[in-house]
Amino acid sequence: MTGPADRLITSLTNDTVKNVRALHMRKERESTGQFLAEGLKFIGEALDQHRAPRLLLVGEDARPHPILDRARAATRAAGGEVVVVTHAILEKISRRENPQTVLGVFDQVYTPLQAIQPATAPAWVALEQVRDPGNLGTIIRTADAAGCGGVILIGDCVDPFSVEAVRATMGSVFAVAIARATPAEFLAWRQKWPGSVIGTRLDATVGHHAAAIEYPALILMGNEQAGLTDTLAEACDVNVKIPMRGRADSLNLAVATGIMVYAVTDKAPLQDG
């Protein structure tokens, strides 16, 4: 499906194809400040958040669709380029046998820690050294669904703009503020947090429903294997435990975060507006 101003690429060795495919590598994403999002749903979520692709790749067999028309117009209006490519190129870029027919290259957006306004949401999520891209993407999606303000990444975390993490967000990567900080930066910033800072620890004695909470709340979750470090746990106003009632002694990080997010936000006072 070619538009009047689209460039057509059929060669697998084209430089544009190589550059886009390289965005699977963290080094390339960091050097370019860009990332890859696949599918019309993702493109539509981006457009709804006023984020236009720098490069829009459209499969030559893509069917007409209103979102695709919007994407083409928004890409050109923002100074980007629309490129039509073959199915073989889509497979090469996505590394999937059944690729989406529309791909977009976007600029990464991080929210500076000091720019976060806690009172704009009932809860925020902070993650220490999260390592699994699927977990991180799912947590971003969950934070969006629950009305959280954003996700703060502390220390050495997986890249939120990796292809795997972005896929797991189901488009919420465009809707949720993402910040990052060293442990020292986070601890200094946390001192001015106006509400409760709630950690999760297996050795905590307070149940996750029992903690008294002052809003806005900041939910602090630890690494998949090691959990929350002592240093960050000590910086919390309260540490809580999700009860394990069966034989399993722990939960997947994304599941545990989802339980905490809804336990906290369900008790939040209604916000004006």
Image (cartoon, rainbow, N blue to C red):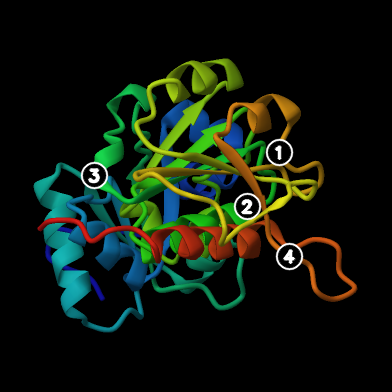
Q: Mark 1 sits on what residue?
A: 228
Q: Is residue 68 visible?
A: yes
Q: Secondary structure at mark 2?
A: helix
Q: Mark 4 sits on what residue?
A: 243
Separation of marks 3 and 4 at Cα, in angstroms? 30 Å
Which residue is more in the foreground, 185 or 196? 196
Q: Secondary structure at mark 1?
A: loop
Residue type marked 2: Pro
Number of the front mark, 3 or 4: 4
Q: Mark 2 sits on what residue?
A: 133
Separation of marks 2 and 3 at Cα, in angstroms? 27 Å
Q: Which mark is residue 14?
A: none
Q: Mark 3 sits on what residue?
A: 120
Which residue is more in the foreground, 74 or 88? 74
Upstream in sequence: badge 2 or badge 4: 2
Upstream in sequence: badge 3 or badge 4: 3
Q: Secondary structure at mark 4?
A: loop
What residue is at 69 percent from the left and 24 percent from the top?
231
Upstream in sequence: badge 1 or badge 4: 1
